[in-house]
Amino acid sequence: MVASLLRRARNPLGRSLGLGLVLTAAGCTAQIQGEASGAGAGGSSSASAEGSVSGHAGTSLGPVAGANSGAGSTAASSSAGGSGSASAGAGGSGSSGSGSVAPPSTAFACDPTAKPAPAVLRRLTMTQYRNTLSDLFTFALGSSSAGAALVSELAASLGGLPEDRREPVPTDLHGSYRRLDQSLQQIHVDASYDVAVAAGLALTTSARLGKVVGSCASDSDASNDASCLDAFIRRFGSRALRHPLSDDDITFYKSAYGSSTKADPAAYADLIGLFLTAPEALYFVEHGGATVADQAGTYELSAYELASRLSYQLWQTAPDDTLLAAAADNSLLDAATYQREAKRLLADARARPTLDEFFEDWMKVEDLPALDAKNDDPVFKAFAGADLPSPALRQAMIDDVIGFLDYHTWTQPAPLASWFASELSFAKDARLAAIYGVKAWDGAAPPPSLPAGERPGLLTRALFLSTGTANTRPIMKGVFIRKNILCSEIPPPPPGANAKPPVLGPGMTTRESVAAITEMPGTVCSGCHGTLINPLGYATENFDGIGRFRTAQQLFDDTGKSLGSKAVDVSGVPQVVLGDTTAISSPRELMQLIATSGEVEACVARNYFRFSYGRWEDPASDGCALEAARAALANGGSITDLMAAALLSPEFRRRTFE
């Protein structure tokens, strides 16, 4: 019977997230305030030589423990909001234009009576599932070292779990957040079943049974077997399912154990397997508590549900003893206790890898191609020269950006504006540090400063510039900034748009070749590329395909023979705020426009909402949660202020049902 129940537990309860189509085929020019100059009439979609790809080329809980309170201390000496002369670089020095359009309000409209979209039954991500098992093993065995040893012992079974993916959705065809991956394939069911069976057997060996169940399960006294079984179901079951078991739960799991209560390691192994395949173990099962006034079908979460939501949001695992104790006496539903617990979890080191996952998905670090794939190509070899990439360079570029974001979040918390002015290097790899022209960072001392004026801000880091080829990809750079940093919509490319890098014309730079293909007046391409995409990508053309600073592009024939060089041009009208005709002539000027636009704070709020709720936002019904997050950043707050605002939002503590 137990085996039959285990097989029935394979039947999933989850379903995929339904995400509506947000992008439309409306023309780019219609999306630009004031019909900005350069937009081709009838430009209804984004034709691209590389495709419309989004990859690479407040309320506070108080200071976070260990964080330096000197917010913004790492900002470059030149103000991100300044309008003075730009630093010298490719494209020359110069002054930004005054701009013809004032930045619009980026605030979200908050309607407290608006009903959020009904929540689907979400499964744990594979990261959350692995972390939960590890903590459950530690609980069952009484020590973290014993729990870690069991995780190692089950490596083969755990290795069968699939990795979560940045699932493509209509609003982001190249994948958004792993937390949005709600696909449920047979491999998920089979792998979790195999892990449950293996864990049950491993936890009930003769060496472990007495520790996991109690000495009553391994002694020779049969009179205590029934109470032993009852105590184990209540203790282990409530931890595995993350809530106290009801009388009906107890009856069910006793029946699953068998008709006899005699201590039997095999029966206990089956019982553990059944707990680990229960819906409450694999999914966020929420029933809600008190109703929310003026929002039919919306409920406050129960104390245990709130404990789980808070813990998985920040730690990617089940609640710890302290959080469970606050749930047990319902004090977690008290505002002061909830704020105290949220602050505690946010200050804990376990919040850092969770935020790193957010950063990795938001920055789409997986989209960086293998940089050494063309090392045998004669053109790439000639182009790279002494900087021919190693296999480790790709990860070094990813670590550099995550290190940048971590530093400005935890070590020296800083407002978002300073991200676009900082000239600090976080390259620990010697090859990457050499590309930057600095010494490698040891991770402990203050990070070294990059050459002054050469590489200002986050978006000039090699991760966002490198292509693994001898050419840059300004279209991809422009789309990434437009969609991921500014959250502006770009209509999809027309059928047949080429997704390959542009082939350089004779004696032409990458910019000139891209412009010739995508900016011809009167074509369907020019409307989007000439206004929304290309100017943003051109602004960093003073960096080559492996992120090196340059003032001229080296040209080669098919054999790698040098054909000389040609000056690069980074000037343009990027329209960071749509309709703004401010001209730029350097990366620094682009960073200044981004930093002062107000668009970034709103965009980060949107992205963190997606990460937190596992769904795409609806500004009409989610406006209050979005505005709380945006305001926390707009007032000079750091990412930890954003995280705190998200936790304190009433919407985070509620669930809406159909």
Image (cartoon, rainbow, N blue to C red):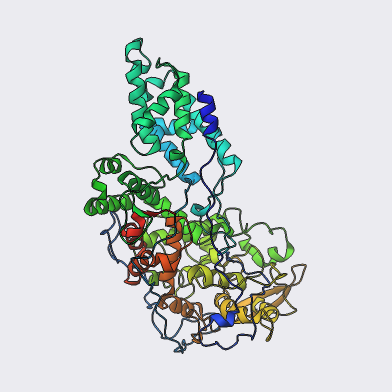
Q: Nearer the viewer, residue 38 or 515?
A: 38
Q: In this view, does 336 lie above or below 488?
A: above
Is residue 273 rendered to the left or right of residue 175?
A: left
Residue 376 in view in this figure: yes
In the orientation shown, which residue stands out farthest toward the right? 559
Q: Which of 183 and 520 is in front in this view?
A: 183
Q: In this view, does 64 lie above or below 130?
A: below
Residue 423 in view in this figure: no
Among the 4 quarters of the image, the one containing residue 562? bottom right
Among the 4 quarters of the image, the one containing residue 552? bottom right
Residue at screen point 37% across, 31% down: 248
> Where does residue 627 sit, x and y in percent of width and height?
36, 68
> Where does residue 86 sit, x and y in percent of width and height?
46, 83
Among the 4 quarters of the image, the one containing residue 599? bottom left
The C terminus sits in image quarter? bottom left
> Where does residue 590 sit, x and y in percent of width and height?
48, 78
Q: In this view, does 94 lie above or below 443?
A: below
Q: Which of 636 and 404 is in front in this view?
A: 636
Is residue 372 rendered to the left or right of residue 422?
A: right
> Where does residue 178 sit, x and y in percent of width and height?
51, 53
Is residue 220 rendered to the left or right of residue 28?
A: left
Residue at screen point 43% across, 68% down: 619
